């Protein structure tokens, strides 16, 4: 978070340079400083002041979406992002932030259809955008479109194959698709890339559970818990552990994970 002194300096700079920039841009500079400083409400006030002078300013509209997102006002954020996109040429790649923001706000509101459309737009802007590929793969996995999920997860792995989140997502998609050998190889490679990550034994536990090897699944899951799972409260909800759901040892591990 930006310090108060730095925030004041940025705002002062915006004021002293006002003669060199138009009023709408001055408000955008100030709003950006407030947003970086963690004060989204003040950012919105500056944005709205700027929009009164220039109602269709794309940068201000996109920044309004960002500030509203930070405040958890997702419907309003989506509306602001859409307005910003509509005010700019449809092929304007500088609006990548707006499309990403719209996708993330859609996910917060459980609207994977719009999220997928926006991530697809980002991929169309830049086919080598590994983050957009990965997010698109996750959305397709959520909507049970395995072919789409595999296509984009594999593309993300080709672009950023040393990334933990990319490899874990790819391994999980392989497991969901029933390609357990590929899943196991991917999770094993993940352990080589990030040796101490909980994601490697966790992934191998998923594969073992799908194969019906409860002992191995529980052993690997225990190892993952010892390495501290990032979201231990979600363990019992993982559908790939369904074969273990009624096992007392699995229930004990769920309790253990919650206490870590």
Image (tube, helix red, strand yellow):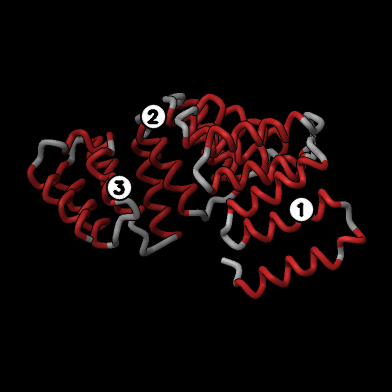
For the question of whether residue 128 can be seen, the reply is: no
Q: Is residue 255 left or right of residue 229?
A: left
* Closer to the eye: label 1 or 2: 1
Which circle's residue, 1 or 2, is located before the other in the chain? 1
The C terminus appears in which quarter of the rendering? bottom left
Q: Which mark is residue 27?
A: 1
Residue drawn 65% across the image and 35% down it: 80
Residue 48: name its quadrant: top right
For marks 3 and 1, the one nearer the N-term is: 1
Q: Are marks 2 and 3 in contact (CB under 8 Å)?
A: no
Q: How many marks?
A: 3
Packing grade of label 2 (10 A; few <14, some 14-19, many >=20) is some
Which quarter of the image is occupied by the N terminus?
bottom right
Q: Position of residue 219 (x, y in %)?
A: 18, 53
Q: Secondary structure at mark 1?
A: helix
Which of the pair 174/50 is nearer the observer? 50
Residue 75, numbered circle: none
Is 235 left or right of 187, judged from the image as shown? left
Looking at the image, residue 196 lies above or below residue 147: below
Kindly identify which residue carries mark 2: 177
**Residue at the disc numbered 3:** 204
> In percent of the image, x 38 and y 63: which residue is there?
195
Name which residue lies at 60% across and 27% down: 117
- Residue 125 at what x, y percent from top left? 72, 36
Chain-order first, disc 2 or disc 3: 2
Q: Residues within 10 Å of mark 1 (few under 14, many from 20)?
A: many
């Amino acid at each position: 978070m930006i310090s108060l002194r730095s925030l004041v300096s940025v705002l002062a700079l915006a004021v002293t340079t006002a003669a060199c920039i138009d009023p709408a841009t001055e408000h955008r500079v100030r709003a950006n400083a407030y947003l970086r400083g963690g004060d989204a409400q003040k950012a919105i006030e500056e944005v709205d002041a700027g929009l009164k002078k220039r109602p269709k300013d794309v940068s201000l509209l996109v920044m309004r979406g960002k500030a509203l997102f930070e405040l958890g006002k997702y419907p309003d954020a989506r509306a602001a992002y859409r307005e910003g996109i509509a005010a700019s040429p449809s092929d304007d790649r500088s609006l990548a932030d707006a499309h990403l923001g719209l996708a993330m706000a859609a996910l917060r509101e459980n609207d994977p259809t719009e999220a997928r459309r926006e991530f697809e737009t980002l991929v169309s802007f830049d086919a080598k955008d590994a983050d957009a590929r990965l997010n698109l793969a996750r959305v397709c996995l959520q909507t049970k479109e395995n072919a789409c999920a595999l296509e984009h997860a594999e593309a993300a792995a080709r672009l950023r194959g040393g990334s933990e989140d990319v490899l874990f997502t790819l391994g999980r998609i392989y497991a969901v698709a029933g390609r357990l050998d590929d899943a196991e190889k991917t999770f094993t490679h993940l352990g080589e890339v990030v040796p101490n990550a909980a994601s490697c034994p966790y992934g191998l536990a998923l594969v073992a559970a799908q194969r019906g090897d409860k002992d191995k699944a529980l052993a690997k899951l225990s190892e993952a818990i010892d390495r501290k799972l990032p979201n231990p409260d979600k363990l019992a909800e993982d559908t790939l552990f369904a074969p273990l759901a009624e096992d007392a040892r699995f229930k004990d591990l769920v309790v253990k994970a919650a206490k870590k």
